[in-house]
Image (cartoon, rainbow, N blue to C red):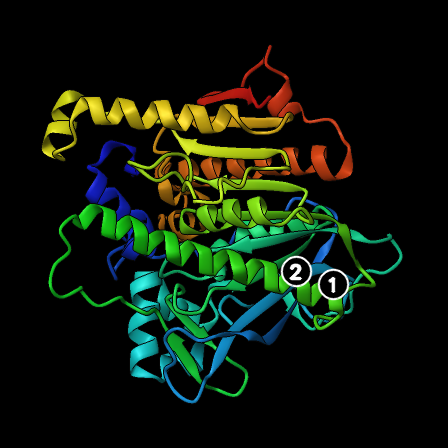
Amino acid sequence: MNCRGFSPCLCVVLILITATASLITANAQAPSSVSLSPLLPMPAGPYLIGRKGYALTDSSRTDPWPSGQEKNRELMVYVWYPAQPTSHPPTGEYVPGARLLDSNAGAKAAAQEMFGARWPQIVSGSIASHAVDNAVPVTHAGKFPVILFSHGITDTTFSYTAQIENFVSHGYVVVAIEHTDAAGVVLFPDGHIRLHHRAATPTPAPKDPLQAMIASAQSETETGAEDVRFVLDELDHGAIPIRQIADLYRVAAVGHSYGGTVTVRACQLDSRIKACISEDGEVNPVGAYFDYPDHASFQQPFLFLEIGQHPTDEMLARMREPRAQWEQYLVHEREQLKACKPRSYHVLLNGADMTHASFSDGLVLSATPGTVDASTALSNLLLTEALELSFLDKVLKKEPSPALDHTRRPLPGVEVEQIGK
């Protein structure tokens, strides 16, 4: 499902307040009697994958919603990196600490909301990652470009494991940020747990509920963008000790839905980021991304991947969105995209059953193996991975980008438009 066909009020709520994870879970749910796919697709690149977690505290920012003794903003960050072969099989926990989370009532409920019928298999280990925790990094191949990854609202970066593993296997270091309060659940090394913060309904009700929701979502996006910039600072300062393998002059930011809006804002504010990808992070009725009072603009090439959907008059009427308002939204989105820098792309994904959830693992893991649904979900996921990898290879590695630039043989269900000035 894509929010481009929904009313402004509902769309803001869906994408930015409570629903990215709900959308993914709803599409990923399977009856308990159905056998779920046990493993993710094998990463296609030549490198094996290591993973290590780091707990960080930003002493310059106070915690807006502390759940205990926290005073400053705290984050969990997981670094996924090209790793040397080991004597152990290349599998690890899909969600680190899943058993501990399952033993906590609040965390278990949050995990079930995120992963649905897959959660018991994640806890048991029958759904696993291809990453080896604390594996020895590859050091003989030079330094690798870095991707800062941001998840959707009420979700976790582990829901995007296949995408992250594919990046790493092709020679990238992925620094995946668990955005505290926006994430469904975050487990820290000392055992304390942070759940998604659900903002209270304002009293009295605002005169303009839509604008109030937009302002709240915009503020949450700003917080996420500051998370990204803080993590990049920590990389620069060596607090996350990966400088021997990470090329901090070749940094990209990638995010899905809420994470896409976070990524855009971080790119607007920080020129250290050299490439920007938003995975279906548009905001109806605002535009491709939020407009901020500082009018900050992109300095880096931008890949905007969007699920292509054109609502009928009947659909707009059902969602109480006037056609004129929809058209105004599209006009502003177009103005924003035209203002991007050269080497930017707007990609509409129109393939069969391509949805907002197609960027994550959920549809692949929940599909019954051998079915058309399983094949379609996997094909859609691999397509998004190929488009993003092609863009990053072009911008950060100066390599050709056949998936985006070979317009004579366009990919089925994909409309690629070069944008920018």
Please give left or right for residue 249 compared with residue 364 in the image. right
Circle 2 residues within 10 Å: few <14, some 14–19, many ≥20: many
Please report contact status of discs 1 and 2: CB closer than 8 Å, yes or no.
yes
**In percent of the image, x 71 and y 57: which residue is there?**
48
Q: Provide residue 228's location: percent of width, then percent of height.
A: 57, 58
- Would you name the residue on which mark 1 appears? 236
- Percent across and percent down for residue 33 are 25, 60
Question: What's the CA distance linking mark 1 and mark 2?
Answer: 6 Å
Q: Mark 2 — residue? A: 232
Q: Secondary structure at mark 2?
A: helix
Residue at 86 percent across and 52 percent down: it is 141
Residue furthest to the right in view is: 140
Rendered location of residue 392, percent (x, y): 66, 38
Which label belongs to residue 136?
none
Q: Quadrant of residue 230?
A: bottom right
State the quadrant of the C terminus: top right
